[in-house]
Structures are given as structure tokens and as C-alpha cells.
Amino acid sequence: MNKFTSVSLGNTALIKSITFILFFMSLTINAQIDRVEPPFWYAGMHNPELEILFYGKNIAQYEVTTSNSIAITNIKKTENPNYLFVTINTKDDAATEIIFSFNKNNQVAFTHKYSLRKRREKSAERKSFDASDMLYLIMPDRFANGNPKNDNDAATKEKYNRDLPGGRHGGDIQGIIKNLDYISSLGATAIWSTPLCEDNDKAYSYHTYAQSDVYKIDPRFGTNADYVRLASEIHKKDMKLVMDYVVNHWGIEHWMMKDLPTQDWIHQFENYTQTNHKRSTINDSNASKIDTEICLNGWFVNTMPDLNQSNPLVLNYLKQNAIWWIEYADLDGFRVDTYNYSEPAGIASWTKAITDEYPNFNIVGEIWMHSQAQMAYWQKDSKIGAIKNYNSYLPSVMDFTLHDAIGTVFNEDDGSWDKGMVKVYDNFANDFLYPNINNIMVFAENHDTNRINEVYQNDFRKYQMTMALIATVRGIPQLYYGSEIGMSGDKDKGDADIRQDFPGGWLGDENNAFTKEGRTFGQNQYFDFTSKLFQWRKTNEAVHFGKMTHYIPENNVYVYFRYTEHKTVMVMMNNSNETRTIQTSRFQESIKAYTTGKDILSDLTFDISKEIILEPKSVVILELQ
């Protein structure tokens, strides 16, 4: 062999080595993992099966193995080669690091380290919100700007513009944390915040119901770590954090919408089709198939793609995302947006997966219907649902029929067959339809409705009756931010009018309603009443889980009792414009041996043995003695 031949052979070996290196590098570059969801998980979960989404260019070309004892039980590939769904079984595994190897041609192209973390102690037994709580509803963008440095973010499209009513105003997680003492002073024991995950729409992104990343807090609100810190600070105040979760839809800017895992990940029609919003079609035995399909599969609006919970990959993704947030952020409950817009079997399976993991975890669904039967259908173990062999497993629903009544009743001065306090009485007469009447949410307003102070033109007496009602009837009361200082807003003028900034949440605000000194006289009047009412409610078990006896309203006066074996509360509402004298003998079956009652609002003691005089448009709440 001559020198030339020897050199040629050496060059050939070198070329082969370089070629292999370049090939390996090309695999690594082409198969870069852009996303892993869930980003990590927890050991010791009730359901040991975990389906991990790996996303990256042409990632489906690889075979996947683990170097640990963790067993891969399934690998799913879809028509989109940029996705791999890898299922592992974590049963009996402790917290650990899992090494996933992505292989091609029997060579390891790249690896990914995945964490199984340790759960909090007694995480599965966490206590949720119930009828002993009062929920304070916040729209974080409009509540308080605690960190002006995050008002804008390079990665999100819509920028800060407080001058624009429907723009981003800068409220954030730090603003909530800063004002936790204020919320607690109201008597609130739980905070329900509208969604905080990223919404990267070009406009109107402040409400964040069109989410673009459901594993990431919107950077204009803060970070994921800030959200965990919010939960921790809330718990230090002996309060609870309720997340607003959206199962039905995402936003058009969600990262998957650019590259769908499967064609049927979302509901699609030949032409854009919006839902008909007729949720009664779901349990209507006479409904047409096309009406039902459009109700369930049509998009909420054209910027909110409708998720297909009939697709097992979608459904499992949503289950795991919800459970991940509970575990990661140490949550105390969910409020679920547009609950009955989702595919019924899918949403029931989603709900049951969560309550299987957390048996005490409460979930309240938005069932915006105007019939108690339609709402009761959706509560767990409903006898109405059983007629159609359906169980949603949803623990709690929102009492929209009571909300409907509250929206008119205190303007109806003359009680009649179907006006005035009879509306409220008739609402409670249908309580038998619900399988768990104590576990429904009662409210006068929320972020989607007219503000109650707008409805009643800031008539303080009508506000008192409204709040006294939701504080003393069965269920879980919810208060919308700002009502406690007299904030009003007209939905007919647009959503921004019912979602105004809380005064004092921004530097330079004319008054700071977060402090007694900063509030106006009128704001303090509203605040002091609300605080006294709900601070008292925290202490009285009769209005938490006690039974209820009510009496047919006479002359627009409504009287009802909440009671346990040891405590009784008597509530009297005079909704007329005249002074009324109430003969208490009519209520003897509820008064029993009690002779006096202390009004928790005025601190006056009433003799209840004969008669009580009620002023016009007034309420008296007596603890019987």
C-alpha cells in the first residue's frame, strides 16, 4: 500500500466521522423539543397514568424509551408529525427525574429530563370552598396595579392603554396580593379571579377567557411563580383561591391553533358556525340533531375555537392541565366557565377525573339557564339528569334564577301574585329539584351582568336588601368586586362599563377606596354595611348549613328562618314603600320558645313575642335568643 492510498483511507474514515456528527447534529436540530406539557408532574397521584405531549419539528419520527424503571405504556402519533403523546405509568414511583431518550436507527438522537415532583402533604384531602364561605370575584386587570413594570410584555400583542375602556389597564397578581387585607376585612373567605392564563389576542385580551397558553400565567399579570405566591399569601390569611377554568374553548391565538395536533382537536365546519347558545337542546327530548350539534360544537365567538372533548387526546389534555394547576398552585376550587357548552360526556368525565383525585374539591359550573330544572339537571347525582341516564359529577351550580329575581324584585314595590318578594319565594319553592341545595352559588351580579347598583340606581336600601338576601339564604354567596363601595355599571354601554377600575388600585387615582381614610362618605357607607354583614356571616352556622323555613310573602314582606338544632336566624324584608307591622304569631312554628332577637345590622334587640314594625324598604336579621 503506497503513501497516497494510506492517506486516502484516512480521509475516508475522517469523512465518515464528520458525516455521522453532522447527521447526529441535524437530528438534534430538527427534533428540538419546543414544548412539553404538562411540563412536570407529581408522584403518588390517584390516577398513575400520565400522557405527556412532546412537540417539536418532525418529532414523531423517533422512538421513545426511558432509562428509568418508569414504564411507557402507550405512544400515540397523529397525522401531524410534530406531536408525540407518550403515556407512562407512575404507580408506586417516588419523586424522581425521568430521562426520555428519542431514538432513530438505533441511535440516541437526544434526551429530555422530566420531573416527577413530591406532592404537598395531604394534597388529595385538601378542603375546598363551601357554604361557610363568601367568594369575592375579581377581574384582575381592573382591580389593582401592584407592579407597573409588567404592564407590557414583548411577547404579547396588546399593550397597556388605560385610556381605552376595553384595553389592558395593568391590574395584576401583585395588586391582589397587596390588597388581601382589604378583601379579608369584607368578610370574604375565598377569592375567585377570572382567568389569569395568557391571552394573546390583539384586543380585549384583559378578560383572558380566550387563552393562548393554558400552562402559563399571562406575563402582564405576573409569572407562574407569582400565582403560586398568591395562593400561599391567600392561605396565610385563612382564605381560599378559586381558579376560573375554561374547558369549552381556547383563544384563536393559542399556540396549537397554528399547528393542530389533529384536525378534530377543535370543532370545525365548512363555514364559520357560532353556537346558537340554546343549551336546553342538550336535554330536550324533542330537539333536532342539527340544533344540538350547533349548540355544542359551534364556536362561542370567532376568536374562541371550540374544543372537541370527544377526542380522547383533547379530553385527557384538559384533565391533566386542570389537575396540574391544582397541584402546582395549591388551589382550593374551580369555577368553570360555560360549563354546559361542552360535550356532556366529555365534561362529566373531566369533572369526575378531578374529584376522583381530590374528593373534597368543589367545582361550581356556570349553567346560565332560567329554569331551576335546567340548572339542577347539571348538578351531581341529579334525579332530573338520571331520567336521561346522565350524571355530570359537577358538585355545584350557579343560581341564575335567583339572580334573575334579584335583578327586578326590589323595584317592584307592590307585591302581587307574581311580583315583588313572591319571585324570591317561588325561587326557593323549587329547591327540591337540586340534589345538594347548600352547594349552589348565590349572587346578585358578576362580570357578565349589569351591576346591581346600576339596576337600583345606587339606592342604598335596595343594596342592603340584596346583600342581606344572598348572605342569609342557602348556598354560597358571591360578591363582585367594587359593589361593596357602591360601584355601578351599565352592560348596555359595553362590558367595560361593568368592569371598571377599582378606585385606588393605580397610582394617581383620585381616591383610594382600599382604605377607610381614602373612601368617600358614600363608599364607607356601602363598605361598612357589607363588611359587618359578611363578617357576621362567618360566625353563624345556621346560615351556612342550616335548614330553611319560609312564609308566603304578604304585603310584599318576606319572612324566613335559617336554623340548626342550636341556632335560629329570622330574616324579615319589607319590600314595600310603606311601614309594615308584622304579627309574629304567624311564625310561631319557627320562633318556638325564643322571645327576643338581636338585629345583627343595627345591634338593636327586638321583642318577638307579639309584633314587629318594619320600615319601608328595609331588612332585619335577628339572631333569636
Image (cartoon, rainbow, N blue to C red):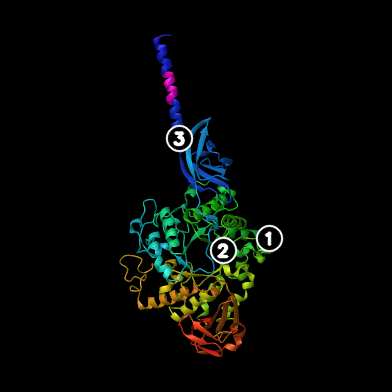
User: Where does label 2 land, which residue?
Assistant: 277
Q: Residue at x 53, y 53 (%)?
A: 323
The answer for how far apart the CA atoms under marks 1 and 3 are is 51 Å
Q: Which secondary structure, mark 3?
A: helix
Q: Which mark is residue 389?
A: 1
Residue at image coords 41%, 9%: 2
Task: Place residue 230 in its image quadrant.
Answer: bottom left
First in sequence, mark 2 or 3: give its number: 3
| Magenta-colored span | 11-18
- Three-letter code for the amino acid on which mark 2 is drawn: His
Residue 197 in sight here: yes
Q: Residue at x 39, y 11 (%)?
A: 4
- Is the residue 171 above or below the residue 584 in the image? above
Q: Position of residue 215 (x, y in %)?
A: 47, 51
Between marks 2 and 3 in the image, the one whose residue lies nearer the viewer: 3
* Residue 17 pos. (x, y %): 44, 24
Mark 1 vs 3, N-terminal side: 3
From the image, tell me which residue sits under label 3.
28
Question: Quadrant location of residue 348?
Answer: bottom right
Decide: is 156 above or below 585. Answer: above
What secondary structure predominates along the stretch shown in magenta?
Answer: helix
Local SS, label 1 = loop
| Residue located at (43% from left, 29% from top) | 22
